[in-house]
Image: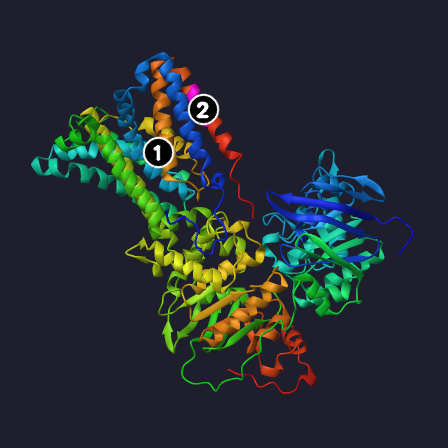
Amino acid sequence: MTETTPLFRLEGISKRYGGVRALENADLTVEAGRVHAILGENGAGKSTLIKVIAGVVQPDEGRMLLDGREISFRDPAAANAAGIVCIFQELSLIPDLSVADNIIASDPPTRFGMIDRRAQRRLAEDALARAGGVDIHPAALVKDLPLSRRQIIEIAKALARKPRLLILDEATSALTAADVKTVFEVLKRLRSEGIALLYISHRMHEIAELADDCTVFRNGRKIATYRAGTKSDNEVVEMMIGREYHHVFPSKPEPKPATGAPVLEVRNLGWAPRLNGVSLTARAGEVVGLGGLDGQGQRELLLALFGVLRGISGEVLIDGKPRRISSPRAAKDDDIGMALIPEDRKTEGLMLPMSVRDNLSFAAMSHLSKGGIIDPGAERRAIDEMIQLLAIKTDGTAVPAGSLSGGNQQKVVIAKWLMREPRIILLNDPTRGIDVGTKQEIYALLRRLADAGAAIVLYSTDYDELIGCCDKVLVMYDGAIKRTLTGAEITERALIASALNIDVAEAGPAPALA
Amino acid sequence: MSDTTAQAATKSRPWRQRIDLPVVTAFGCIVILLAIGSLYSPNFLSPEYLLQQLKVGAFLGVIATGMMLVILLGQIDLSVPWTVTLGAMMASAAVSWGPAGEVFAIPFGVLCGIAIGLVNGIGVAYLRIPSMIITLAVNAVAQGLMVAYTGGFAPQDSASAAMKVLAAQSTFGVPHAVLVWVVVGALAVFMLTRTTFGRAVYGIGNKEVAAYLSGVPTQRVVMIAFALCGGLAAFGGVLLAGYAGKAAQSMGDAYLLPAIAAVVLGGTSILGGRGSYLGTVAGVILITLLQSILSVMQIAEFGRQIIYGVVIIGMLLLYGRSGKVSS
């Protein structure tokens, strides 16, 4: 190792929340000009570690050294002032403000005591350029931009604070492959400029590409630090989950010959201007993937199917019969049997302050009650069954859903819909920001549900997931399905090419399956 | 209760997390108030005095029940004052129509309140008007209607016999008004804890989007909650008219702040989604005792108002520091 003092050092940091120890005697050394990846399942202590470094929480024990001098941060502003800037998993942008206002949110340039708009805009443009978002207009409102662009703005906002240590917590989880590439170029340039980067991600291939050093955490403890590339993926995952790691994805069944009417058929669905004539079929036992770049209408398609959007044209057929689905309530009706696992589990999927019990039975109330009166016995049985089926880790059913880890929260969202035994399951990026172990369980569960006769429509921003889980993938572009990939055609290359709406010569003939 | 943890649970929660801090605080304050009162007069601990307080509190209790429903949704109903008055006046008006009116006086008064509540509910749920605005406007309209009906004078109609029996009389020393509150309260507890409607109310109060995406008819639930609130406010007015013998102008004005305060002092979050009926009961008793003690201490009206307001702010500050759930 080098003789010089490292840029930043943690020694013996511990942090407890009530009886739960989130971090136990953690050490970490971050050097300037290197990318240090932190790996670990959700609940491994990564988030707490970052919060300690960024000054969001104070450690109970241990010390922090910056340039060899001991420091402590009262609040995030103090950490910022010392050159430590964090990009958190949850976006922190204000939707109703312009891009420039968001980037220079604190401490804007002033002139005669008033914000100097021109200087502010120039600073914002510089920051955007450094973050790889030259195409983003500084005066645009954040709420008009798709998620992936917002992430770029988030990075620009961090850069505007002139960081020496930049922390990225799942900063790419909302990004599509193309955007990730842009962000990586930016990060590599920042590294060559001598900035230290602390990088947290659940995507292994991203870490392989970017990281110089890696540290694995498990249950609040540091397991190991190693040079990137010195351990195999299997070894790393084993360290993370502490158990043998076999196949991430369950094996796919042989395609069955199509018989009878598909459970779900969509003909020429439109919702101007975001959806333009989408047609698809999903049969019982099939996992249908939705691919493509972020913001090409996948989210709208799922919402339209679920009856959320108004003013939809086209036809939706359930079991071959045309149906009009005008609300989620109609969609979940037993003779349609649809379920939607929404994009954001914290705001759309769960009522976080309510108990695990209330959340689990919330969508299936009509099955657990007679004449509007809840049958507590039936409710308890159904909840116990779901907790066991999905192996939800919770300290009883009376605790708030918000106290569970991200992976277990997502399990609750899925479980609350499984309680209705849906026949059509729509999932909007269900594994975003979830640890490997839980992902694996969700993949296996999806396949089990399909085998049991459900038709599954899965939108994912993770290509590996589409390749590993789906029987066919519909690639969307500009509100329409541009290409249908089945079986062996589902490759990363084909997915990317069709997502960008370009033809790849060597991909071979691609007969479009209706 | 069905709250008891399921078998899948590894261990039960520690008792501190099971007991609602605000409810305990409110009951604690009740005890303190009674202790202070008993320094002035030993009568404060006599069953007669306590029953009398419960009787006075029953009217507020019925009105606060409806208010709690609406606050649980994260909304507010400012039309309560004139819905109370309207309920009282319409029930009394029915009496003047003859024997049939005498029979239908109570349901007629309540129905008028439900109608007001429906207007509120439709405005909030379907037209998406902020509840603070529409209920304030509806309150003004209800006031206008009542002034037009009475010509601005005290109405001459008197309460029906049934209203007087319900509100003013007792059996074996137990005021009927208290029994009415017990029944209303029991129904409210059942509705909040054991029905799909109750679950939907809590769900919407916590996160309306999540409730909607779970297939709950959120608009209908909101509308019904407002209708119930209007109906209960009017019923409170009917009881008040029975108690006083007849309706009076502005008789509901004294019930808006106390109703909101009782609900919130009982630990129901003003932002919705959290709270128990037991807390509202405690809040109602607390407010009633506070009012009684302030008048017994012969503090001037302005002093009472100040103390009353300060106590409410103080309690809210106290609760605001607890029970935040982080994501």
**Residue denoted by label 2:** B311
Q: Marks 1 and 2, Cα distance to the nearest angstrom?
A: 17 Å
Depth check, front residue: A279 or A360 = A360
Judge from the rendering whether residue A470 lies leftward or rightward of residue B21; answer left or right: right
Q: Which residue lies furthest to the left in this view?
A: B99
What kind of element bears circle 1?
helix
Across and down, in percent, residue B145 comes to 26, 34
Q: In which quarter of the image is the N terminus of chain A?
A: bottom right
Q: Can residue A23 be seen in this snapshot?
A: yes
Look at discs 1 and 2 and give the one toward the viewer.
1
Residue that badge 1 annotates: B281
Which amino acid is tagged 1?
Val
Residue at 55% across, 73% down: A289
Q: Does the magenta stretch include residue B311?
A: yes
Q: Which of A438 and A338 is in front in this view?
A: A438
Q: Position of residue B318 (x, y in %)?
A: 50, 30
Instruction: Say which residue appears at 43% left-offset and 52% top-offset.
Output: A358
- Mark 1 — on which chain does it sit? B
